[in-house]
Amino acid sequence: MIISLQHCDQCGTCIAVCPADALMLSEFKVIVDHEACTECGICVKMCPIAALEVKNED
């Protein structure tokens, strides 16, 4: 999961919809717990400003 910090406005939508509770707000930015994230993509679909994307780390 990648968050574009220059686009993210910390609205909290992604945090509210994450079924794995893998997102949290810390010091004015959203942080991803990569171990908890299942890369389901719900947060990506729900982000009103498209600041998130699922990206596989190969």
Image: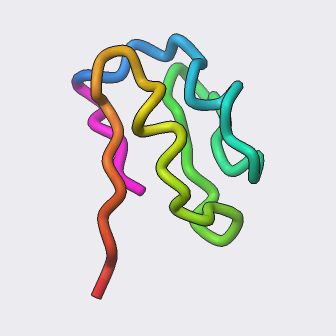
Q: Position of residue 10 (x, y in %)?
A: 49, 16
Near-viewer residue (17 or 24): 17
Count up the numbered dots.
0
Q: Is 50 one of the magenta-colored residues?
A: no
The vertical placement of 45 against 12, above or below, is below
Rendering quarter of residue 8: top left
The vertical placement of 32 against 55, above or below, is above
Q: Position of residue 21 (x, y in %)?
A: 76, 46
Q: Position of residue 15 (x, y in %)?
A: 65, 30
Furthest residue toward bottom: 58
State the quadrant of the N terminus: bottom left
Query: Could you tell whether 4 is left or right of 32 in the image?
Result: left
Q: Position of residue 5 (x, y in %)?
A: 31, 31
Rendering quarter of residue 34: bottom right
State the quadrant of the C terminus: bottom left
Query: Could you tell whether 6 is left or right of 9 in the image?
Result: left
The vertical placement of 15 against 1, above or below, is above
Kindly identify the residue that appears in the image at 67 percent across and 31 percent down. 17
- The segment highlighted magenta reads 1-6
The vertical placement of 33 against 43, above or below, is below
Kindly identify the residue that appears in the image at 28 percent across and 27 percent down. 50
Near-viewer residue (33 or 55): 55
Furthest residue toward left: 6
What predominant SS class does the magenta segment belong to?
loop
Kindly identify the residue that appears in the image at 75 percent across and 53 percent down. 20
Q: How is the image coloured?
A: rainbow
Kindly identify the residue that appears in the image at 61 percent across and 65 percent down. 38
Query: Could you tell whether 47 is left or right of 28 in the image?
Result: left
